[in-house]
């Protein structure tokens, strides 16, 4: 179906002959190329990001004035729930995955991900799962319980509609996609690094992608179980979370937050990695304290599993548990603070080039410091008792996830855009985008700190006049419109760059140090003509830094001097099994494009629909067809693999 | 299957971490199994959260769960683990026929286990323990049911391996497909070791 | 399917035939069939002992049963799953997952113990929506949706 949705600029460099040979959409639908999959991830997540942003604007418009009647209360519940669900699971997470998908194999000098077909499957399952979730709006009502879906509000007696069913089935699909993707990243990074690329030479974005993937495979099972139990409650008559049947809603909270807190790091760590890549390049000096950043990320990952109940202080865990979870949460501030000093230390004394990626990276640091500090305050139980479920928490999470993750991801998009598409984004529009977004963001979310301390609860559809909430709500709403405009500028920028005639972007336009910049922009299907050999942490800066401590005696491979004969691209174009380059060159086998991952993902979505529908005829039809799709595609997939 | 040879024929820089010699599929399988640990950990934790209620409820687990019968099931899974390693061992030594039949034996034992579990579930249903009968029924059935689902998928996987082995698809140079199926199968066995002790035996 | 990475040097002449090439895993260390059967016999005996222990209440059940379960677990993982002979990375995956699973189990037990000091009577009572229990995350929604969801508050929700 919509493989080609908003995919901005396909690689025009592919030879016209190849384009004519196969239907254009097919190349996207059946692709197993990590670069195309990465671009599809980014495009789809941007589309969902726009939907989620639109929902945010609806919420803010409803709250612009007291006793507003713009949205019906029930619709308001659906919109804010879907806003959060969309932004977290369909916006930020997949955008990080998309950037990682594109960049990580290039960074480590690999030809593709470890499992290219599984990679395609992850994308399509995410994409269909996102559509599945959003279909709920037109199929009997969207989820309306908030993004952490506390039981027993999600249970049948309190919520007889299909909203929670859509939510739990959709998240289950996305969870499968995430775990499959994470396993893929782990194997890719552990196994497929170029010769010489030790862990201490791994680019920091690759480091955090590895850690994030570990967080995903160990955190997602918890929510998988929570969703399964909830599914049994809603569809099979159990009462795991229903007090009337002996269940305990608190179990939901524990299972959910055991996943939910690591999830926060799953969203922020990739952005931290992007910033750690962007800052050295635009400061023209190596990152300050490389190993501190790497190890502090590991520490954050570990500690992230020990603090989940800080979301549950008000459930009355008791002093000991409160103290323990508060201590752990404060502790996380240490490795996080270490990173911030590292970033500032990188900027310090550098010869800064304030291009758009650096602006976004600096915006990230500034906003993330504010979000981090409000997080520290919330880690203290007495403060949390006051602020929980108020707009203070809303301010905090947006400073971390918007001011942090989204700013970091935009830095990454501006930074890697020329590599991905062979064109730059317009610098003027980019700066306008940054400044509008920075101002709009702080206008929107900073006043929420005050609203929260004044006691305005989150998730209410309106408030009374004369409670002291009017002014800051108005400011926040106006700020959110600015934010909307800034995002529109980015969209315009992206389209303009696609429409401009192709320009010749050099391999390494930013004079960066990592391997992805040693190949063409955009790279050929097989990424590198020769396997790069790595002798230092900054392979492309070696020439400039002859005193480099690493491998000074080792023979230098001239990574960026590898030639890219034009006919390589056509010859090894995707799907051409084993196109052999002549002479003493190398033989690359990229897997053939295959349709089975798409079919399997589609079959799983059909099964989700089958679980959703009550009428037996529909149920059986969807179940059977889903199973048929599943069996056929798994069979075909296995046959392809074992051939 | 990407095969890359360098132009000049000299060996590349030595493997920096030793990870390069690992098999891609085995590495992925282990990552997945690590994830599965938490999956079953969360399920078992959910059971234990409700354990005080379960023990206070009616019927009590010990009144309806037969330890001897379950011990038999545990033995069956243990034997299937043995046949699985024997299958792999045979394949690695190019005794292809034997490997195939050991694989088949493993699948048959797995099916026997499933049959035993189905029998146990029907028996429980007759005693009034179902998904909606109360806290014990739901916790027990969902936990063991998900283990059973894993066994079921494992049986299908083993049968696929059997079919491939009969076609001569495995040999001493190409056995990873059977090995990762085995890893999964042993993991399912390990989970049953945990469930058997934690749910059935501990008073 | 095996896709050795470029990083894996393939000597000249060994330009692998796709699909037949498997990673050279350290086969020499793998035990033979005899060892596998021996491990099975030990596993068999331990399982029999587990069942036997339940017939003797004077034996401290929990420590005895847990020890034996851990033994079985270790034997299967070490020999049948080859962890003793394979890369430590594989063991690390299992240990990490186990560590988290056990940590989760123990901390849930600790967190819920106070909670279940005595089994409570499930109660469904009527309260005013939005008052009474400061139900985390639910009061606002139930307040917003009015009568549809707010009618029944649960005694547990706010705890
Ligand atoms: Cu948290």
Image (spheres, rainbow, N blue to C red):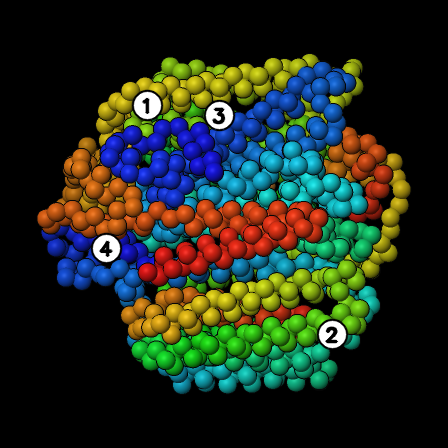
For label 3, being within 8 Å of ligand 1 is answered no
* Residue assigned mark 4: B3
Horizontal and vertical percent for residue A347? 36, 27
Q: How far separated are the C-alphas under marks 3 and 2?
A: 63 Å
Identify the residue at horizontal 46%, vertical 54% (top origin). Answer: A633
Front residue of B191/B103: it is B103
Identify the residue at horizontal 32%, vertical 60% (top origin). Answer: A643
Residues marked 3 and 2 touching at CB (< 8 Å) = no
Identify the residue at horizontal 32%, vertical 29% (top origin). Answer: A421
Rendering quadrant holding ligand 1:
top right
Secondary structure under the numbered disc 2 in the rendered image: helix
Q: How far separated are the C-alphas under marks 2 and 1?
A: 68 Å
Please name which of the two marks, 4 or 2, marks the residue nearer to the observer.
2
Identify the residue at horizontal 64%, vertical 42% (top origin). Answer: A166
Q: Are marks 4 and 2 on the same chain?
A: yes
Q: How far separated are the C-alphas under marks 4 and 1?
A: 34 Å
* Residue assigned mark 1: A424
Horizontal and vertical percent for residue A404? 50, 30
Sequence order check, earlier mark of 1 and 3: 3
How packed mark 2 is, by other alpha carbons closer than 10 Å (few <14, some 14-19, many 20 or more), is some
Please name which of the two marks, 4 or 3, marks the residue nearer to the observer.
4
Q: Quadrant of residue B68?
A: bottom right
Relative to A195, is A635 on the left or the right? right
How packed mark 1 is, by other alpha carbons closer than 10 Å (few <14, some 14-19, many 20 or more), is many
Label drawn at residue A366? 3
* Residue assigned mark 2: B123
């Amino acid at each position: 179906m919509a493989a080609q949705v908003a995919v901005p600029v396909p690689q025009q460099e592919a030879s016209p002959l190849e384009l004519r040979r196969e239907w254009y959409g097919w190349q996207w639908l059946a692709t197993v190329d990590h670069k195309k999959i990465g671009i599809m991830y980014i495009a789809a997540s941007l589309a969902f990001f726009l939907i989620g942003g639109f929902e945010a604007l609806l919420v803010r418009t409803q709250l612009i004035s007291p006793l507003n009647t713009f949205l019906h209360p029930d619709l308001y519940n659906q919109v804010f729930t879907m806003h959060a669900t969309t932004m977290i699971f369909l916006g930020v997470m997949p955008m990080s995955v998309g950037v990682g998908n594109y960049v990580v194999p290039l960074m480590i000098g690999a030809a593709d991900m470890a499992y290219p077909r599984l990679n395609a499957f992850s994308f399509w399952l995410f994409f269909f799962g996102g559509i599945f979730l959003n279909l709920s709006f037109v199929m009997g009502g969207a989820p309306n319980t908030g993004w952490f879906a506390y039981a027993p509000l999600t249970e049948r007696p309190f919520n007889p509609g299909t909203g929670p069913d859509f939510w739990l089935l959709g998240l289950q699909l996305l969870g499968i996609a995430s775990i499959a993707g994470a396993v893929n990243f782990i194997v890719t990074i552990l196994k497929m690094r170029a010769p010489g690329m030790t862990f201490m030479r791994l680019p920091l974005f690759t480091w955090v992608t590895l850690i994030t993937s570990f967080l995903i495979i160990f955190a997602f099972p918890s929510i998988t179980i929570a969703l399964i139990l909830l599914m049994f409650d809603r569809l099979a008559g159990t009462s795991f979370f229903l007090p009337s049947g002996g269940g305990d809603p608190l179990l939901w909270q524990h299972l959910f937050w055991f996943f939910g807190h690591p999830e926060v790091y799953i969203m922020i760590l990739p952005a931290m990695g992007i910033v750690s890549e962007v800052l050295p390049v635009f400061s023209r000096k190596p990152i300050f304290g490389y190993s501190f950043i790497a190890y502090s990320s590991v520490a954050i990952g570990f500690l992230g599993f020990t603090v989940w109940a800080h979301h549950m202080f008000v459930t009355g865990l008791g002093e000991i548990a409160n103290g323990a979870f508060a201590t752990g949460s404060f502790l996380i501030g240490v490795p996080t603070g270490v990173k911030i000093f590292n970033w500032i230390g990188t900027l310090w004394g550098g010869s800064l080039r304030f291009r758009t990626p650096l602006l976004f990276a600096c915006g990230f640091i500034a906003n993330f410091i504010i979000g981090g500090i409000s997080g520290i305050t919330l880690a203290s139980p007495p403060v949390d008792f006051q602020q929980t479920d108020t707009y203070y928490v809303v301010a905090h999470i947006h400073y971390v996830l918007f001011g942090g993750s989204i700013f970091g991801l935009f830095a990454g998009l501006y930074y890697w855009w020329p590599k991905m598409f062979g064109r730059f984004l317009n610098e003027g529009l980019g700066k306008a985008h940054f400044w509008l977004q920075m101002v709009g963001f702080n206008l929107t979310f900073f006043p929420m700190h005050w609203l929260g301390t004044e006691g305005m609860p989150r998730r209410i559809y309106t408030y009374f006049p004369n409670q002291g909430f009017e002014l800051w709500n108005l400011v926040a709403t106006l700020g959110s419109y600015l934010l909307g405009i800034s995002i529109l500028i980015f969209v315009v920028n992206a389209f303009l760059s696609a429409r401009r005639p192709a320009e010749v972007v050099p391999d390494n336009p930013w004079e960066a140090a990592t391997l992805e910049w040693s190949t063409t922009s955009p790279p050929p299907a097989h990424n590198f003509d020769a396997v790069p050999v790595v002798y230092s942490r900054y392979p492309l800066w070696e020439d400039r830094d002859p005193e480099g401590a690493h491998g000074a005696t080792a023979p230098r491979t001239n990574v960026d001097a590898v030639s890219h004969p034009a006919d390589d691209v056509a010859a090894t174009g995707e799907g051409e099994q084993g196109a052999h380059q002549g002479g003493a060159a190398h033989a690359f086998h990229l897997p053939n494009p295959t349709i089975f991952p798409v079919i399997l993902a589609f079959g799983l979505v059909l099964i989700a629909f089958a679980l959703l529908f009550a009428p037996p005829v529909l149920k059986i039809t969807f179940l059977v067809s889903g199973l048929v799709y599943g069996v056929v595609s798994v069979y075909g997939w296995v046959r392809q693999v074992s051939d | 299957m990407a095969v890359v040879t360098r132009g000049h024929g000299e060996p590349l820089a030595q493997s920096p971490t030793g990870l390069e010699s690992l098999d891609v599929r085995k590495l992925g399988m282990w990552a997945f199994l690590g994830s599965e640990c938490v999956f079953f950990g969360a399920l078992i934790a959910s059971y234990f959260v409700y354990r005080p209620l379960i023990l206070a409820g009616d019927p009590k687990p010990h009144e309806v769960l037969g330890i001897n019968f379950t011990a038999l099931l545990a033995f069956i899974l243990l034997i299937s683990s043995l046949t699985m390693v024997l299958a792999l061992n045979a394949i690695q030594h190019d005794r292809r026929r034997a490997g195939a039949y050991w694989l088949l034996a493993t699948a048959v034992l797995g099916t026997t286990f499933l049959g035993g579990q189905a029998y146990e579930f029907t028996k429980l249903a007759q005693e009034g323990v179902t998904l909606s009968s109360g806290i014990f029924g739901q916790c027990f059935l969902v936990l063991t049911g998900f283990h059973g689902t894993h066994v079921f998928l494992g049986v299908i996987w083993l049968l696929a391996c059997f079919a491939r082995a009969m076609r001569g698809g495995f040999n001493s140079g190409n056995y990873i497909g059977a090995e990762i199926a085995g890893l999964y199968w042993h993991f399912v066995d390990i989970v049953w070791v945990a469930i058997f002790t934690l749910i059935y035996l501990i008073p | 399917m095996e896709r050795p990475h470029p990083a894996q040097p393939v000597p000249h002449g060994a330009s692998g035939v796709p699909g037949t090439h498997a990673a050279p895993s350290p086969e020499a260390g793998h035990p033979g069939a005899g060892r596998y059967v021996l491990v099975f016999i030990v596993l068999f005996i331990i399982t029999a002992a587990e069942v036997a222990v339940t017939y003797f209440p004077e034996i401290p059940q929990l420590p005895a049963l847990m020890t034996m379960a851990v033994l079985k677990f270790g034997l299967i993982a070490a020999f049948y799953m080859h962890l003793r002979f394979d890369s430590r990375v594989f063991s690390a995956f299992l240990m990490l997952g186990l560590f988290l699973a056990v940590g989760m189990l123990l901390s849930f037990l600790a967190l819920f113990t106070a909670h279940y000091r005595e089994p409570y009577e499930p109660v469904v009572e009527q309260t005013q929506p939005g008052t009474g229990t400061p139900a985390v995350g639910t009061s606002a929604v139930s307040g917003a949706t009015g009568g549809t969801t707010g009618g029944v508050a649960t005694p547990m929700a706010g705890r």
